[in-house]
């Protein structure tokens, strides 16, 4: 039986399912659940397994989230029978959010095939030029441009974040429905993505912004830049609102020699999903 968890007025809060399979570590699922509950969206969270994921049950939630875990093949074995209801949920306007293993399973081989055609996921640590070259629990550096919260409009460079065999997304091409949210600092490979799938949206991230202090203590490692819950909340907001941070000089255009800067915290919001258009000859 699915039990929703979280505090606050239930009627005013979106609902989310967080995957917790029969062989999965509940701590990994609970970390994602706590991130969702603590986000500005203040989700009601239910932990679900394959028997709980049906077309009808998915109609009751806004978001389906998959945490980290140990094995893609085992997860796919559990998910394959319910893959189509999940795809239909997202295509109908739902949201999918995958952390590490959840990002792998959003891919194509094997996976839910929620990422754009021609893309797939691989382990960053398997690449010869990667900052981390093994599967130990450690930290890695990423670049992240914030689009929400107190850091909206700011870019975090070389930010240390918890990492354990996280993925990068291969052949991910940005367009008006596919966006890179974060990159690995050393290699510039894609660490976090947002893409449209049908009428819904899919967010993935290779590292672990949901990691709390207990993760670092258990692995006997330090967090040089502190916990990265803020990145996790920013990722959630991007998936839920489709609003991304943009530097006009880099992503839209310049008017004359002047670069105009837009961010969600300011007076103007550039929301690609709503197709707001900035003319090259007409400033707003």
Image (cartoon, rainbow, N blue to C red):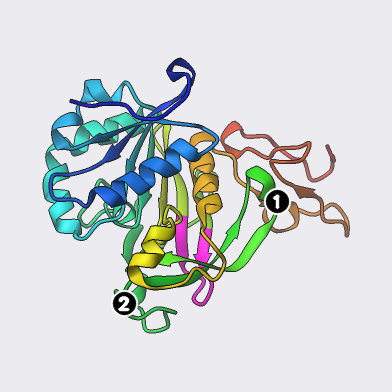
x, y percent for residue 65: 34, 41
Callout 2 crowding tier (Cα within 10 Å): few <14, some 14–19, many ≥20:
some
Q: Which of 49 and 189 is in front in this view?
A: 49
The image position of residue 210, as x and y in percent, is 43, 52
Stretch in magenta? 182-192
Lower position in the chain sequence, tag 2 or tag 1:
2
Q: In this view, does 246 lie to the left or right of 231?
A: right
Asked if the residue at tag 1 contacts the one at tag 2, i.e. Cβ–Cβ closer than 8 Å, the answer is no
Secondary-structure class at tag 1: loop
Distance between the alpha carbons at the discs numbered 2 and 1: 33 Å
Q: Is residue 268 left or right of residue 20?
A: right
Q: Does 208 lie within the magenta span?
A: no
Quadrant of the rendering where the C terminus is positioned:
top right
Q: Which of 258 and 214 is in front in this view?
A: 214
Where residue 171 sits, quadrant-wise, is: bottom left
Q: Which residue extends farthest top?
A: 11
Give above or below for 198 relative to 226.
above
Task: Identify the residue position indicated by label 1 in the image.
Answer: 153
- The residue under label 2 is 126
The answer to whether residue 152 shows anywhere in this view is no
Quadrant holding the N terminus: top left
How far from the left and from the top, in percent, is residue 107?
29, 53
Instruction: Judge from the rendering whether residue 123 lies leftward or rightward of residue 74; answer left or right.
Output: right
Q: How many labels does the image show?
A: 2
Res. 71 visible in picture: yes
Residue displayed at 49% across by 35% down:
240
Q: Does 46 appear above or below 141?
A: above
- The image position of residue 102, as x and y in percent, is 31, 51
At 69% from the left edge and 56% from the top edge, which residue is drawn? Answer: 154
């Amino acid at each position: 039986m699915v039990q929703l968890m979280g505090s606050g007025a239930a009627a005013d809060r979106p609902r989310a399912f967080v995957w917790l399979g029969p062989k999965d570590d509940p701590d990994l699922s609970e970390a994602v659940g706590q991130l969702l509950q603590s986000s500005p969206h203040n989700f009601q969270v239910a932990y679900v397994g394959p028997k709980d994921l049906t077309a009808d049950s998915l109609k009751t939630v806004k978001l389906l989230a998959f945490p980290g875990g140990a094995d893609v093949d085992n997860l796919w074995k559990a998910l394959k029978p319910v893959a189509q209801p999940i795809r239909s949920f997202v295509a109908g306007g739902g949201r999918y959010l995958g952390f590490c293993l959840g990002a792998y399973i959003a891919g194509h081989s094997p996976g839910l095939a929620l990422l754009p055609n021609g893309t797939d996921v691989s382990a960053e640590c398997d690449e010869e030029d990667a900052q981390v070259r093994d599967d130990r629990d450690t930290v890695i550096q990423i670049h992240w441009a914030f689009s929400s919260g107190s850091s909206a409009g700011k870019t975090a460079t070389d930010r240390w974040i918890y990492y354990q065999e996280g993925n990068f997304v291969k052949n991910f091409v940005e367009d008006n429905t596919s966006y890179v949210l974060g990159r690995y600092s050393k290699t510039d490979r894609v660490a976090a993505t947002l893409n449209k799938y049908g009428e819904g949206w899919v967010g993935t991230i290779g590292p672990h912004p949901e990691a709390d202090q207990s993760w670092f203590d258990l692995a006997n490692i330090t967090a040089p830049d502190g916990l990265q819950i803020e990145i996790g909340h920013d990722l959630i907001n991007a998936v839920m609102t489709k609003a991304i941070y943009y530097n006009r000089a880099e992503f839209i255009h310049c008017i004359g020699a002047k670069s105009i800067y837009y961010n969600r915290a300011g007076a103007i919001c550039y929301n690609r999903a709503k197709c707001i258009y900035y003319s090259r000859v007409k400033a707003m």
